[in-house]
Amino acid sequence: MITDARTADGNAVAGPLSQIFAFDVTRMIVTCSACGSESPLGALRLYGDTMGMVLRCVRCGEVNLRALQFNGIISLDARGATRMTFPLPANLR
């Protein structure tokens, strides 16, 4: 497992990602491509800060998501997640 003094949980990335997604991203279920573990994004381990963020699986430490905010863009790399499940708002169920 990777440890770093600047680590936090995935809730810390909610602000920047809310600029992309129109729902509470911390409730999104992320499936790790390495171990198959399913975790809410809010439970993933965050490394970095708002300019460059890496979210790692809580079970195996694999990088699941990368987010980069620079020069007015947000880039999201999700190649470490085999699936991301988004909750539907109650009015769409």
Image (tube, helix red, strand yellow):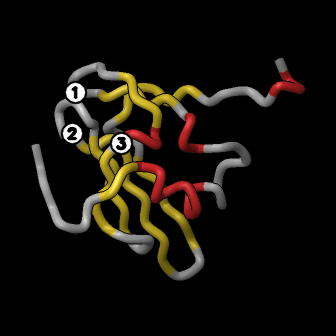
Query: In the rendered structure, which disc, 3 or 2, sits on the residue that comes first in sequence?
Result: 3
Q: From the image, which quarter does the N terminus lie in?
A: top left
> Mark 2: which secondary structure?
loop
Q: Position of residue 73 (x, y in %)?
A: 56, 71
Pick whichever of labels 1 and 3 is earlier in the sequence: 1
Tell me, yes or no, whether the two marked residues, 3 and 2, touch with CB atoms within 8 Å.
no
Other residues around mark 2 within 10 Å, as few (<14) / some (14–19) / many (≥20): some
Q: Which residue is under mark 1?
A: 34
Residue type beneath disc 3? Leu
Residue 27 vs residue 36, the one in the foreground: 27
- Mark 3–mark 2 Cα distance, whole angstroms, equals 10 Å
Q: What residue is disc 2 on?
A: 62
For the point 21% across and 39% down, the residue is: 62
Quarter-of-image position of residue 7: bottom left
- Observer-side mark, 1 or 3, equals 3
Q: Amino acid at mark 2?
A: Glu
For the residues labelled 1 and 2, say whether their Cβ atoms are less than 8 Å apart: yes
Identify the residue shown where x is 46% and y is 40%. 41
- What mark, if any, has residue 44 been given in the picture? 3
